[in-house]
Structure formats: C-alpha cells, structure tokens
Amino acid sequence: AALAIGGQLPLVLLLATGPWLLANGVTPGALVGALAYVTQALLPALHNLVHGLGASGSRLAIVLRRLIWDAPGNSAPCEDVTPERRTSPAPALRLSALTFAYGPHAEPVLKDLELTVARGEHLAVVGPSGIGKSTMAGIVAGLLEPDAGDVRVDGHAVRGPGAVGRRVLIPQEAYVFTGTLRDNLRYLREDPVPDPELLAAAEAIGLTPLVERLGGPDADLVPAELSAGERQLIALTRAYLSYAPLVILDEATCHLDPVAESRAERAFAARPGGTLVVIAHRISSARRADRVLVMDGAHALCGRHDELMERSPLYRDLNGAGEWGAAPDEEAAVSHPPLSLRDPYRVDPVPRPGLPGDRGHVVAHRSVGQMEAVGDLGDRRAPGGE
C-alpha cells in the first residue's frame, strides 16, 4: 500500500505546488506540459515499478521465512529418514477434517476431507479439473496451509521440522537446471550417490536411453535442449533417489506415453519402504493403484477400482471420458511395448527442443530443495491451477 501511494507522489506534489510555481514565473503551458508528462509517462513507469517491487518483495519474504525456518538455530533437528531409520508405526499420510479455501470469503476447495494412506500403499487421486486435487498435493507438500484440520506425514505435522525430508512432490512442469546430469539427479541427496545406485534408478524409471545418449552421468545438461518428457524423467529419477518415503506425483508423467508412465509409476510403487500418491490424468494410473480417491467437491470416495466402478457415478464417467478412456489392450502394450523410431525415449514429441521459459519447479522444503513459485500446485479456481 505504501508503495502504491508513493507512486502517486509526483502528481500530488505537482498539483500542490502549482499555485506557487505559477506565482514564481512558471507559465501555465509549462505547468500543463509537466502534468501531461507525469500522467502519461512517469506514472505508468512508476506503476510498473511498484507492481514489480511488490511481487518481488512477496517472493523475497517467502524465501527469507523459509530460510529462517530451516536455519539450524530456529528449528528442531531434522530426523534421519534413510531407509534403515524408517520405523515409525504411524501411517504415511493422514488428513483429518481438512478444509482449505483460497480466501476468507471463498468457497472451500476442500472441506472436512478425511484420508489415511498406509505405509507402502499406492493411492491414485482422480476428479474433474479444478476440484482440488493439486491443492491437496500442495498442502501435503507444505506449500499451502490448511484453514482447518490436521495433516500428518509419517506422524509429523506437515509444516513442522519433523516432516522435512519425508515427502517429495513432483509437479507437472519438471525443473532441470544447468549443470551435469549427476548434479540434477542427486540434488535431493546430501550424501554421495554411487554410480551403481544412480544407474539402477535411471534404469528403473526409464532414463537409461537419455543417460547413454548424453554420454553418462557426468555429461553437461542444457535444459533448453531437453524435451518436456525428458525433463520429467530426470525429475522422477531425482525423486526416486531421494530418501523421502512419501512421493507425490502431481500429473508428473503427463508428457510421457502410457508405457513410460506405467514404468515410472510401477518403479515408485515397488520402491522399498516407499508410499506413492498419484494425481492421475489417465485411467490406467487409477487401475494400477491399490486404492483410488475420487474427489467431486461435496463428497470424496476412496476404494479399489472395481468397488468405485459400482459405487461412484463420477468415477464411471471418468473411466469413459476423453483422455481417461483406456484402450482395451493398454496393459498388453505395457508388457510388450512397441519400438518407436521417432521417440526412442518414449516421451511426447515437441515441435522444437525445450519449453519456453523453463518455469517448472520441483517441490518445497529440505526434502525437495526447490521452491514452488508460480502456482503449479494451485486449484483452477485460484491462480496457478491444476
């Protein structure tokens, strides 16, 4: 507010001192010219500056708050979450009476949502666009704060230090930074990653063809030369190598074909000690899951695929609509993938290398190490969208 008022100060000063200026020899024409310059040139420039400073200031405040939160002197020590230490009896994820709205007078996107995800479970989340699937993912990742209710990750409050390092979120637009492939893949690990482990993770996710094409893990990466699907494979392998037991894929495989998507999801589902939550955009993702959460605003149903086909009209509709419709031989295609000369990495072709802007981001907090800044996790009814 202070910046906005300050942006109008030149015009106010000119109007206030107008009589004095006229009395001291300034001609009316010169005064009118000065007013025209201020209103037509100076004020728009100041307006843009104020808006830019406001947005940058907000981002800076968020960064500083998270840096202070994560500082060793201001938070409890982060617990070891390596596989040998994952002995908590608590469920991997528990939502209790979760309510969230994007403003004090807005309709809640999530209302009294109850959900328990057992350790090692594979859950798919489905529902119409804008229903709150990505909002829920953002809350679980600690990016959004619920208005009411309780969120626990492995028994720890989701925004507390105990949850740091226990969950990792991969949004739709995957972030890849300039550097070596190894640097990108081990970003969420503080300890060195041996080559056999790194290459095994790449093989599990389906990144091996890209690793070989680039010349090995120590090859330099140029993000603009990677396709959207290749970026997603790198982000998925990065998350696979992390120690976070809870992995959330928020349409993180949307640029992969069904075969590559199936391979990546099955790899995460088979990850030792790992729990997988998938915000699904294909019905095959729901069929692979142990349970499916169907969100339709007022109600949420959770159950197995065959149970929901009987109990949920919305789920039946999603099974037969648009990109949700699965070919009868899709699972056969997964077992016997055809060769493709156009796309050996099984990613969607793009008209030119890279994506404009390279705006994708991977996660928040120490487990993820990168900040979500532009609303990849938001609901469609708020800036960002899912």
Image (cartoon, grey):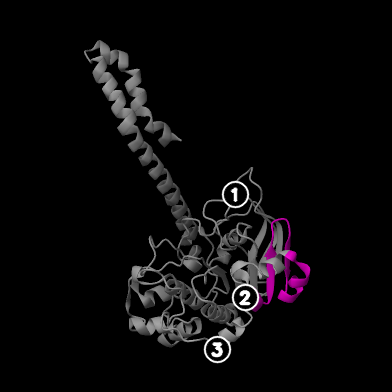
Residue 11 is situated, as x and y percent measured from the top left of the image, at 35, 26
Q: Are marks 2 and 3 in contact (CB under 8 Å)?
A: no
Q: Which mark is residue 341?
A: none
Q: Residue at x 26, y 23 (%)?
A: 33
Secondary structure type for disc 2: loop
Q: Does 306 lie within the magenta span?
A: yes
Mark 2 or mark 3, which has the lower sequence index? 2
Q: Which residue is mark 1?
A: 102
Q: Which mark is residue 336?
A: 3
**Which mark's residue is nearer the viewer, 1 or 2?**
2
Estimate the spatial distance between the alpha carbons at disc 3 and disc 1, rounded to whole Å.
45 Å
Whether 351 is drawn above or below 68: the answer is below
Q: Does 69 lie within the magenta span?
A: no
Q: Which residue is mark 2?
A: 326
Amino acid identity at mark 1: Tyr
Q: Which residues fall within the magenta stretch?
A: 285-313
* Residue toward you, 97 or 219: 219
Amino acid identity at mark 3: His
Q: Residues within 10 Å of mark 2 (few under 14, many from 20)?
A: some
- Left or right, 41 with reference to 88: left
Q: Is residue 280 visible?
A: no
Q: Is residue 183 visible?
A: yes
Secondary structure type for disc 1: loop
Estimate the spatial distance between the alpha carbons at disc 1 and disc 2, rounded to whole Å.
34 Å
Mark 3 or mark 1, which has the lower sequence index? 1
Hey, which quadrant is residue 118 in on the image? bottom right
Residue 255 is situated, as x and y percent measured from the top left of the image, at 49, 71
Secondary structure type for disc 3: loop
Whether 141 is drawn above or below 262: the answer is above
